[in-house]
Amino acid sequence: MSKTFNECEQNAWGGFLSVYGKMSRIIEEDLQSHSHLTHVEFEVLLRLSWNETHQMRIQDLAAESILTRSGVSRVVERLEKAGLVKREEAPEDRRGAYAVLTEAGAERFRIAAQKHGECVRANFLSKFSEDELKTMGEFWARLEE
C-alpha cells in the first residue's frame, strides 16, 4: 500500500493539524476562563468589530468562518440572549438578517481581545522571529488566493 503523503508533506500537514488542534484547545480554554466566550462567539464579535458599521449579514459571517449559516445563526442567537449582539431584518431582503454588535458586545469584545492577544502572543507568536512571522503571513495569504 502506498503512503498518502511523503515524509516532508506528512510533517508539514500533520504538524499543521496538530498545532491547529492544540491552539484551538488553548484558545477555547483561555476565552472561557476570562470572558466566558467560546472561540466561535469570539470570532463573530471579532468580525463584527472589524466591520466599519459593526454589522454583517448572517450569511456573510458564515462565508468568512468555519461554521455553516445555521451554525452562525445559533451563535448569533446565543450572543443576542447575552445582549452582545442584536439581530436586525435586512431591509433589502426580508429573508436575510444582520447581526449587529451592541455597546455591551463591543466592550466585552474589547476586554476579551486584550486577553486573547496575550494568550496568542505567549502560545504562538513568541515562538517565531519577526522574519518567520512575515513569511508565515505570506504563506497564509497564498492559501487565501
Image (cartoon, rainbow, N blue to C red):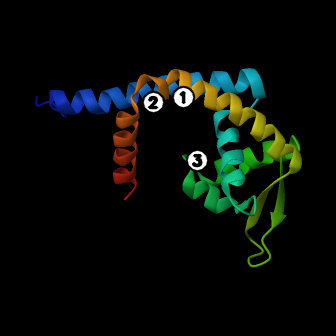
Question: Outermost residue, bottom direction?
Answer: 92
Query: Residue 109 is drawn in which quadrant?
Result: top right
Quadrant including the N terminus: top left
Residue 24, x across and y down, in percent: 54, 28
Judging depth in this view, the residue of 61 and 101 nearest the camera is 101
Residue 76, x across and y down, in percent: 75, 49
Residue 48, label in figure: none
Amino acid at pointer 2: Tyr
Judging depth in this view, the residue of 117 and 129 nearest the camera is 129
Judging depth in this view, the residue of 96 and 45 nearest the camera is 45
Q: What residue appears at the point 43 percent right and 23 percent down from the top-left corner?
A: 127
Real-space CA distance between mark 1 and mark 2, rounded to the nearest whole angstrom:
6 Å
Q: The residue tagged with tag 2: helix, strand or loop? A: helix
Residue 23, x across and y down, in percent: 51, 26
Judging depth in this view, the residue of 109 and 63 nearest the camera is 109
Above or below, 70 against 108 in this view is below
Tell me the crowding category of disc 2: few under 14, some 14 to 19, or many 20 or more residues within 10 angstroms, Cα based.
Answer: few
Evaluate if marks 1 and 2 touch, with contact meaning CB atoms under 8 Å apart: yes
Q: The residue tagged with tag 1: helix, strand or loop? A: helix
82 sits left or right of 127 in the view: right
Real-space CA distance between mark 2 and mark 3, rounded to the nearest whole angstrom:
16 Å
Q: What residue appears at the point 78 percent right and 71 percent down from the top-left corner?
A: 90
10 sits left or right of 66 in the view: left
Amino acid at pointer 1: Ser
Which residue lies under the disc numbered 3? Answer: 67
Which residue lies under the disc numbered 2? Answer: 20
Above or below, 91 against 58 in this view is below
- Mark 3 or mark 1: name the one nearer the start of the chain: 1
Q: What residue appears at the point 37 percent right and 59 percent down from the top-left corner?
A: 145
Which residue lies under the disc numbered 1? Answer: 24
27 sits left or right of 11 in the view: right
